[in-house]
Amino acid sequence: MKKEILISGFGGQGVLSMGKILAYAALMEGKEVSWMPAYGPEQRGGTANVTVIVSDTPISSPILSTYDSAIILNQPSLEKFESKIKPGGTLIYDGYGINTPPTRTDINIYRIDAMDAAAEMNLIKTFNMIVLGGLLKVHPIVSIESVLTALRKTLPKRHHKLIPQNEEAIKMGMGIIKEAK
Amino acid sequence: MAEQEITLMKGNEAIAHAAIRCGCDGYFGYPITPQSEVLETLAEQKPWETTGMVVVQAESELAAINMVYGGAASGKRVFTSSSSPGVSLMQEGISYIAACELPALIVNVMRGGPGLGTIQPSQADYFQATKGGGHGDYHLIVLAPASVQEMADFVDLAYTLAFKYRNPAMIMADGAIGQMMEKVVLPPFKPRRTDEEVEAECPWATTGRRNKRKPNFISSLELQSEEMEIINLRLQAKYAEIEKNEVRYEKYMCEDADYLIVAFGSAARIAKKVIEIAREQGIKVGLLRPITLWPFPTAIVKELSKQVKGILSLEINAGQMIEDIRLAVEGCVPVEHFGRLGGIIPDPDEVLDALKEKLIK
């Protein structure tokens, strides 16, 4: 098994930390992982993205030309990365950030209205976990238990009280993701 | 055992953790992207409260390298880290440290240049690291990690080599290796040496005149040309010894290769992906990854050149290591270069296209 995943959105949406938690959860399950951020000035307001690779075998390049799955959280990211998803691959996008929806017909496209859901629940900060839940529904790369372990390992102790909310968010994401059109 | 735990961290963080664990005595540095996590991690870990390791944010790169100079002169395991423009500022100090034959570690997490450049990854400091950088006839031992695990492992290796040869060593990484997270097993804890152990290992060091021993004097100044030539000849003999003993490289899928990519650091990781794709298309490509950039693995490049139809030097620069490859193969096979500049990382597809265009045609 090898999954090459891109997560891209605005800086501040939790793109990098979503990738980190996914990578850490995969590590907990004994997988090989790499987490390669675009660490440029785009983190401060523009687009931020991260490439996460989860594999049963050693990972060659952490930097890729094409991806199995892309999670797209704003319009500039869609324009940049829609063409870089492998045929037969997966695109997940949040409807809130996208004015012009994706047009490819050779990939599987899913929509998750995570921003609306997070706002409704008054849990804006769990936005990225809702999206992660959506990804895990479509591709069960890691178990929810591993994600919760990863949260416990990566969050400072003072934030551990928020873990149940994150779990709720992941489950909500699994519920609300749907095939586009 | 807790210290054997597999963990996920950035290359820069791995450097800091490995330094604490391998008995490092002191770090002196100045922040610069993309290597600031080295100093940040050390500050977070507070090793001065546990191992007694000193961590100083110096007022500048010049101050930092000269603190390293002083620490190294007293036989301590000291290091600094910076990124390209910062390492340029350190070159005078590095030349002095090399001239005085002091063991020290310098970490360069390269970014795009020249000048202040960009903050994204680059390998454009190959010439600076392997051909001098500072003034005079000297060499650094240059190690090029290609994974977060090697970032951790090369700290102790660099110190071992630096103390064995009394010579500064450099870990030459780039922004990609520094910023990416991978799984890593940190080295086991090794205590810092006691003062007695430092004196025993480094009888040349300025450790204080216990038992009224003859004073040690460390300086790079020698006004008599005849004496300076003798010093230079001694350095050259040492460099020849290092070239003989310390070449390190990784060969990957070379057995049946018709074409060879030579690449180091993150470029070597990209090369492995290129090889996966190329072999799916029936093109037999192998990789030679120099682990020591100096001493350069000349003999193995020469040997492989007899087997392949062409060599691609894949570097994230405009073509620097290609000169060493061409010297090694002595014109017996075409050697071409591909790279991206200014902080752009080449993607595997464009590398394969370049390999086909330049070598297979």
Image: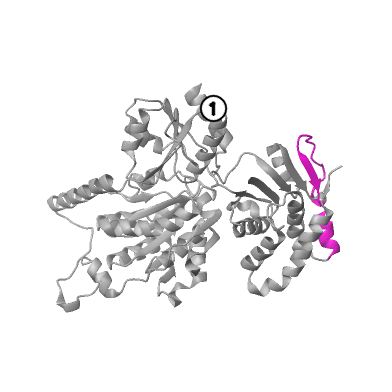
Give B114 or B16, whichever is nearer the viewer: B16
Render colour scheme: one colour
Q: Position of residue A104 (x, y in %)?
A: 78, 36
Residue B56 against residue A22 in the figure, above or below: below
Label 1 residue SS: loop
Q: Which residue is mark 1?
A: B282
Q: Position of residue A52 (x, y in %)?
A: 63, 50
Query: Magenta region: which residues?
Result: A96-121
Q: Position of residue B184 (x, y in %)?
A: 51, 58
> Which chain letter goes with mark 1?
B
Q: Residue at x 23, y 61 (%)?
A: B219
Q: Residue at x 59, y 57 (%)?
A: A27
Q: Left or right: where does residue A124 sit relative to residue B161? A: right
| Residue A118 sits inside the magenta stretch | yes
| Residue B304 sits inside the magenta stretch | no
Residue situated furthest top in the rendering = B361
Residue B257 against residue A158 in the figure, above or below: above
Give B193 or B1, whichever is nearer the viewer: B1
Residue B219 against residue B358 in the figure, above or below: below
Q: Position of residue B283 (x, y in %)?
A: 52, 28
Task: Indicate the quadrant where residue B216 lies.
Answer: bottom left
Badge 1 local density, few (<14 within 10 Å), some, or many (20+)? few
> How many marks can you see?
1
Q: Residue at x 12, y 50 (%)?
A: B226
Give B276 or B102, whichever is nearer the viewer: B276
Task: Give the residue type that dot 1 points to.
Answer: Gly
